[in-house]
């Protein structure tokens, strides 16, 4: 009986979170789009990333679609009581002093999970950068999972999941194709967003 009640409680929580998230997005004038069937495991490429607000909107999108996504963040954030919040939000601590390959570790993590979503901002910063980081590509390629091209377009007030991309191993061509998807997307601060040159 306790198990059944727990299942119903969890279901109710998820349904309520979806409703609340949709209501918040609707209140602020956002249109939620999903052009794909989300796979059970994928790397979610999120762009443009020019503001701290992107994290809030992105999290609401995840809740609206019942997606428990994870993200990488410096281990320094995992101190009490922030560590509780970070774990709840899906944060994965990154120790930059370690020599072990984060790409290998995350690829292995994908293999051990039946469902796993890793959200990554390819710019790696909210500031203007002229070159996107390729770590998300290598993780997806090594784990043999697709990349979902997610977007936040402040000009059209649209956000969501736009395209499913499978890596080929030709990183130059693949990166150009993925970046072309974001050419008409506008960040909160447009001057901070640049389609990278390889």
Image: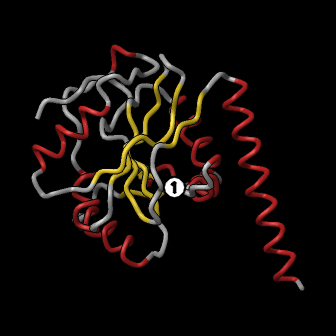
Q: Is residue 126 left or right of residue 181?
A: right
Residue lying at 40% horizontally and 31% vertically, measured from the top left:
49
Residue lying at 51% horizontally and 55% vertically, measured from the top left:
69
Q: How many marks?
A: 1
Note whether 103 is above or below 47 in the view shown: below
The residue lying furthest to the bottom in this view is 1
| Quadrant placement of the N terminus | bottom right
* Residue 29 percent location from the top left of the image: 65, 22
* Residue 187 percent location from the top left of the image: 42, 22
* SS at circle 1: strand
Q: Is residue 9 left or right of residue 103?
A: right
* Residue 173 percent location from the top left of the image: 11, 44
Q: Is residue 109 left or right of residue 8?
A: left
Dot 1: few (<14), some (14–19), or many (≥20) neighbours within 10 Å? Answer: many
Viewer-nearest residue: 95 or 30: 30
Viewer-nearest residue: 68 or 94: 68
* Residue 97 percent location from the top left of the image: 28, 57
Note whether 93 is above or below 21 in the view shown: below
Residue at image mark 1:
69
Viewer-nearest residue: 154 or 121: 154
Viewer-nearest residue: 28 or 134: 28
Describe the colour scheme in one phrase: secondary structure
The residue lying furthest to the right in this view is 1
Residue lying at 45% horizontally and 49% vertically, measured from the top left:
36
Residue lying at 83% horizontally and 67% vertically, measured from the top left:
9
């Amino acid at each position: 009986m306790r198990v059944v009640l727990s299942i119903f409680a969890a279901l109710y929580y998820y349904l309520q979170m979806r409703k609340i998230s949709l209501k918040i997005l609707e209140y602020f004038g956002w249109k939620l789009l999903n052009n794909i069937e989300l796979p059970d495991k994928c790397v979610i490429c999120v762009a443009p990333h020019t503001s701290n607000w992107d994290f809030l909107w992105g999290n609401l999108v995840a809740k609206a679609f019942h997606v428990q996504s994870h993200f990488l963040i410096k281990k320094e954030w995992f101190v009490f009581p922030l560590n509780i919040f970070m774990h709840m939000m899906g944060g994965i601590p990154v120790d930059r002093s370690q020599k072990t390959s984060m790409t290998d570790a995350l690829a292995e993590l994908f293999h051990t999970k039946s469902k796993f979503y890793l959200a990554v901002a390819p710019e790696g910063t909210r500031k203007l950068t002229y070159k996107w980081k390729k770590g998300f590509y290598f993780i997806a390629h090594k784990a043999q999972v697709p990349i979902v091209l997610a977007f936040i377009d402040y000009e059209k007030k649209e956000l969501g999941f736009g395209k499913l991309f499978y890596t080929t191993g030709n990183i130059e061509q693949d990166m150009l194709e993925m970046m072309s998807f974001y050419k008409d997307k506008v960040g909160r601060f447009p001057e901070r967003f640049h389609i990278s040159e390889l």
